[in-house]
Amino acid sequence: MKEIPAKYEARDIEKKWYQYWVDNNYFHSEPDDREPYVNVIPPPNVTGVLHMGHMLNNTIQDVLVRRARMLGKNAVWVPGTDHASIATEAKVVAKLKSEGIDKNTLSREEFLEHAWDWTEKHGGIILEQLKKLGASCDWDRTCFTMDETRSKSVLRVFVDLYEKGLIYRGVRMVNWDTQAQTAVSDEEVIYTEENSKLYYVKYKIQDEDNYLVIATTRPETILGDTAVCVNPDDPRFKHLKDKKVIVPILDRVVPVIFDSYVDMEFGTGCLKITPAHDINDYEIGIRHNLESIDIFNDDGTLNKSAQVFVGEDRFKARKLAVEKLEELGLIEKIEDYTNKVGRSERTNSVIEPKLSMQWFLKMEDLVKPAIKAVEDGEINIIPGKFKNVYRHWMDNVRDWCISRQLWWGHRIPAYYLPNSNEFVVAETEEQALQKAVEITKNTNLKISDLRQDNDVLDTWFSSWLWPISVFDGILKPENPDFKYYYPTNDLVTAPEILFFWVARMIIAGYEYPKQKPFTNVYLHGIVRDKLRRKMSKSLGNSPDPLDLIDKYGADGVRVGMLLCSPAGGDLLYDDSLPEQGRNFANKIWNAFRLIKNWEIDKNIQQPEHSKIAVEWLDAKINETIEVINKQFDDFRLSEALMTVYKLFWDDFSAWYLEIIKPEYQKPIDSKTYAQSIEYFKKLALLLSPFMPFIAEELWQFMKNDNDTESIVLAKWPISEKGNSKLIDEFNTCADVVANIRAIRQDKNIPQKEKLNLQIIRHDNYSDKFDLVIKKLTNLETISFVNEKPEMAVSFLVKNHEYFILLENLIDKDAEIKKIEEELKYAEGFLNSVNKKLSNEKFVANAPEKVIEIERKKLADAEAKISILKEQIQALKK
RNA sequence: GAGCCAUUAGCUCAGUUGGUUUAGAGCACUAGCUUGACAGGCUAGGGGUCAUAGGUUCAAAUCCUAUAUGGCUCACCA
């Protein structure tokens, strides 16, 4: 066999095995008799490149899927991307602009051609990157929210909801993104505190020499004012009934109205009303029948209705308005002020409340079964604290604005009749025509006479169908794939899209297949840097995931991501995490090298210490498998990983291998060797969901004719009955070994120098591991005595007294001091136990079992104290 | 402003219906190791009055009430 390198080099190995898995189609699934295990990927943006959040998200999914596959389930993980209307359109517009092309000069069709080109060029990148991470997706099933099946599904659902009366069109105040020039939903607006100014502006009262002062943060909207409002209970303004005021700059005469919406405490108690540009003003405007003057163009510049500053941007207009007001002497004062400003999630531009015609989905009834499903536990949200958040949003849900004024996306299938605002809704143009003919009774009507709505649908209006549509469950609810794979199992995503996506998928699940879309929602944390800042391109605090994989290996990065990612908690990323993962891979690699390089001698007997170690490790592995299974069931993935990590590093490498390791350049017996390989294979299996690449590499070295050709196809190990007594005895042994090692270190005795150990046994001494102790600490002899030897260092394990005989190295005073410290601790402990037991109420009320434990503690402590006292006495002699 | 969640070692977190020795892990830290698998390592070790103040209980990190601090969600006052 060729030399195995001392350092594990992940790069070539990972490339080799991923190719092998894909070539053999191991990740592909077809329906069969087995129980399915199904996850759908949260589709990343087609515009995106892999970032740290994806790494975490997909690592978790891959761990779950790989383990499910090993548990014998028919596992499928469906990959795909979404079309990300706003983000993609923005990128394409920007690209065109860099080529000197203005979007507005293109027809819709021409623009879409560019967008598709762009998508074909960039759309696959992120999925290719996921392969580097080891993602075991069924690539044959890759979907895109705008491919044929998914698009048709979206249109069918739109038509169906429209026909059910759940979709309506209407003028509403929406959140307008002036940069993307589209409406966005409430969920897409992020409010943050920003420093701004509060302007106090004087409005002249008509036919009086008096002024009324209003406070505003947006003086440019004065141009759209149609009233000034005060609270009807405010004594300061009672005299203003039926009065009018003059809007500055324009000298427009508007009424003073009275509405209890106005907070008397705030500002001046007078509120200017601009119904076209503020949601509250809009509602007040409706109540008081006010005129609504829209002063903005779609791009945020002022239009003709503003009369002045026409064509200027809204922020420039603000400056100009203030200057003008100052010129007119109408600014009373300007204060610094902090308020919440809403910005578009996609473009970060300040959201402009705008009245416009949009399409909405009525949510009130749709959410009901979705609320119940989570309430009843039919769907679990992990961690559970998000159940509240979900509930709260659902209870207060508002109608969903589903139209976007963009071209890239699913065009709304509403067709207007010629010269009319009347429309028909249909899945295809042909069907639309048919409906139009029915309505108009005009049989000469042609498709070209109809005008399709210009808007597209919100991207989430397609991704909310994802778990259904990836199996074609909207168009063909009876197809075998859908019947077999739906509902899916675990949805893994970040809490930030709980409403955007998760809640809406649940709604769609109960509206269409009338079944939950998934059973568990596992919400993982957000990847942040060490300073708890979210990773972002603009901050430049995010490492490039592919660089990390290159540097630490995909296995290393996966371990790094998982190690500190408890459910729902933030993950504070640091390079030390994948480094720890890489070091672990190296540890595994070297353990393997050690075993692989041993020479096997069939003629030698298995040494007794090896026989015992083999027995113990078997018990330990069995016990640990149960722990890991439980942790998986509870979605405690980072803990499951840590359990495997310690099993491998501490139990297998640090203890087991050290025990069975033959002397330098001596061969190992064939029995221990074979058993060790079997254990190593089990460990590789336990590791493989987390570190699939190194696990496969080792599997290929170790597999025999009875094993599967790839670890991907192998079965998750089954835990046989553990032997807790043996494990307990081993722990005692480990304690003794550690004590002896500490003595060597303390007294500067090299490992090579043999020592003699004497033991005074008390009750329940087991000699099972004595040979292990002897080997690990290089003892000449172990002997049992009744008298404390002189000139020895002592320690206590489980009330057995251990003495290492040392002729010249004993510092009696130091020994006494050490034992006195131990005595002090024991006495303190005894004291606390005594306090409990002497408490009558405790003895009377506590369960017998608890009292029993306390009595045992007492007895143990007393025994220990008397031993320690004797030892001090002996030393003082 | 309303609601929810958290606060345990330097850092990140466990601690499962209150009782397994006066609290555990990983990383970091300290000391000692040219030990033939591994310095990406080995061995040993230090480190916490469980945010604060009360309360319930025989018994509290764990239950209750306040307070403080941090976070999340929703709403929003110009």
Image (tube, coloured by chain):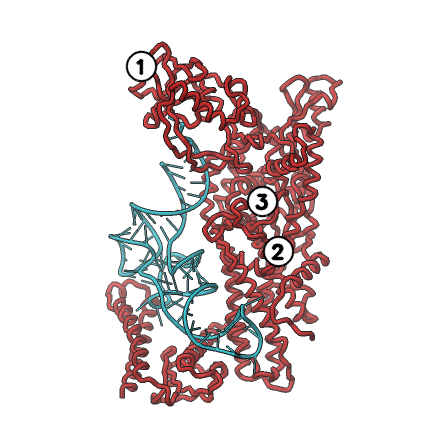
x and y, in percent, of residue A865 in the image: 29, 78
- Which residue carries the number 2 mark? A133
- Quadrant where the C terminus of chain A sits is bottom left
Nearer to the camera, A553 or A673: A553
Q: Colour of chain A?
A: red
Q: Is residue A828 left or right of residue A783?
A: left
In this view of the protein, can residue A867 be seen by the observer?
A: no
Q: Residue furthest top?
A: A207
Q: Is mark 2 in CB contact (under 8 Å) with mark 3?
A: no
Total labels drawn: 3
- Quadrant where the N terminus of chain A sits is bottom right
Q: Residue furthest front?
A: A327
x and y, in percent, of residue A242 in the image: 36, 12
Q: Which mark is residue A424?
A: none
- Spatial distance from mark 1 to mark 3, Cα to Cα? 61 Å
x and y, in percent, of residue A516 in the image: 57, 44
x and y, in percent, of residue A30 in the image: 69, 52
- Which residue carries the number 1 mark? A239
- Which residue carries the number 3 mark? A517
Using a 10 Å C-alpha cutoff, classify the residue at mark 2 as few (fewer than 14 neighbours), some (14 to 19) or many (20 or more).
Answer: many
Q: Colour of chain B?
A: cyan
The chain containing the residue under callout 3 comes to A
